[in-house]
Image (cartoon, grey):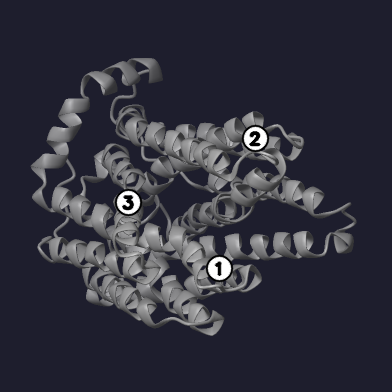
Amino acid sequence: MRRADRRRSIRAWAMYDWANSAFATAVMAGFFPIHFKQYWAAGMAASESTFWLGLANGAAGLMVAVMAPVLGAVADRCGAKKRLLLAFVGLGIVMTGGLFFAREGAWVAAMLLYALAAIGFSAGNVFYDALLTDVAAPGELDRVSALGYGLGYLGGGLLFALDVAAVTHPHWFGLAGTDAAVRAAFLSVALWWAAFSLPLIWRVRESAPAISPPILEAARAGVAELADTFHHVRRFRAVWLFLVAYWLYIDGVGTIARMALDYGLALGIDAGALIGALLLTQFVAFPAAIVFGRVGERYGPKAGILVGIGVYAGLCVWSLFMKDARDFWWLAGVSGLVMGGVQSLSRSLYARLIPRDKAGEFFGFYNMMGKFAAILGPVLMAVVSLASGSNRLAVLSVAVLFLAGGAVLWRVQVRSAAGG
């Protein structure tokens, strides 16, 4: 591929992060949990609505975790990473747009639409991550992966900021009220996701396998050879060591992201200030992820990840002394400095370790570990909180995940895997 064509392909690939991060930010982290309780499940006991919301998230995550390795193997066998990506993207976009039409009290429909959208989002990322090895040369992995994450934080943050403005001041946008503004936000995410996925569709070319069987035949073979997939992962010591480390520290990252607002509310911080801190995280993470990509190129992705893990562990200790919104904003800003870097360098380091011709298969396991993460951390926080009666000690306990993940990552020998 010519240099100019490769650059266009890289930019097109990275723009998909700009496209789909709107779902993660505005829908998953932002409006859906609140709107589900206050609009679709209005009148339902808070504990019951929390149960159904947790069930939707858990079921979607479990389904993707189980499917990911098989889907990745299928994509490798028949050169279908891009086709399968588009299929799941289509599912996510249509279901997200469908939330606009779910009326008040229709909590079952809203829950099903959200769960299917989350499956489309998460399963699509299996193939999006795997396409990294098709668009980037080995020496470009850190920078290109960081570019994707950086654009994702910026794009997701921009649309989220616009939607927050619409929800806060619906009359500015000609909307009838807050409920109409939130429903319009879901539609805006679907349109944004669809529009900015087009560059990937037009520009990214997938490497073709030597033999390309029909998808159904490849699916049967993929299911039959799932045990062989585990064998492939186990053949590479650095790969499975990294996956264990990744499971531990990314669980910590996910726990901080999911539980930070709850911790802020427990400290009595105003909800508006917490939303503002969430937006700050998005915009700080954009340039920080790009910088971390350069750090990875110069010093190696493993060193960059270890620095990020150390900062996260320090934040857990610092949380013991937080008092007000200003402290929370500092926490959000520092977290944003390392969050994108840890995620982007993890993806590029993993891409260095795996065989390039089995990227879909191996990234299926990578995404599976990501889905099974964010289980241990919240449980650990819940147990410590219940036993100690202290939210501060509960957050401090998450440092254990970062320290354990860093210790395992230290043992990973970074050498590129063979291509066979």
Pick whichever of labels 2 and 1 is earlier in the sequence. Answer: 2
Judging depth in this view, the residue of 257 and 306 nearest the camera is: 257
Q: Position of residue 146 (x, y in %)?
A: 41, 65
The residue located at (48%, 71%) in the rendering is 285
The residue located at (18%, 44%) in the rendering is 419
Please give the label number shown on residue 110.
2
Q: Quadrant of the C terminus?
A: top left
Which residue is under mark 1? 278
Which residue is under mark 3? 379
The reply to whether dot 3 and dot 2 touch (C-beta < 8 Å) is no
The amino acid beneath tag 2 is Ala
Pick whichever of labels 3 and 2 is earlier in the sequence. Answer: 2
The residue located at (37%, 69%) in the rendering is 341
Write down the quadrant of residue 391 in the picture. bottom left
Q: In the displayed structure, would residue 29 be above or below residue 332? A: above
> Which of labels 1 and 3 is toward the front?
3
Question: Distance of mark 1 from mark 3, alpha carbons?
Answer: 23 Å
The amino acid beneath tag 3 is Val
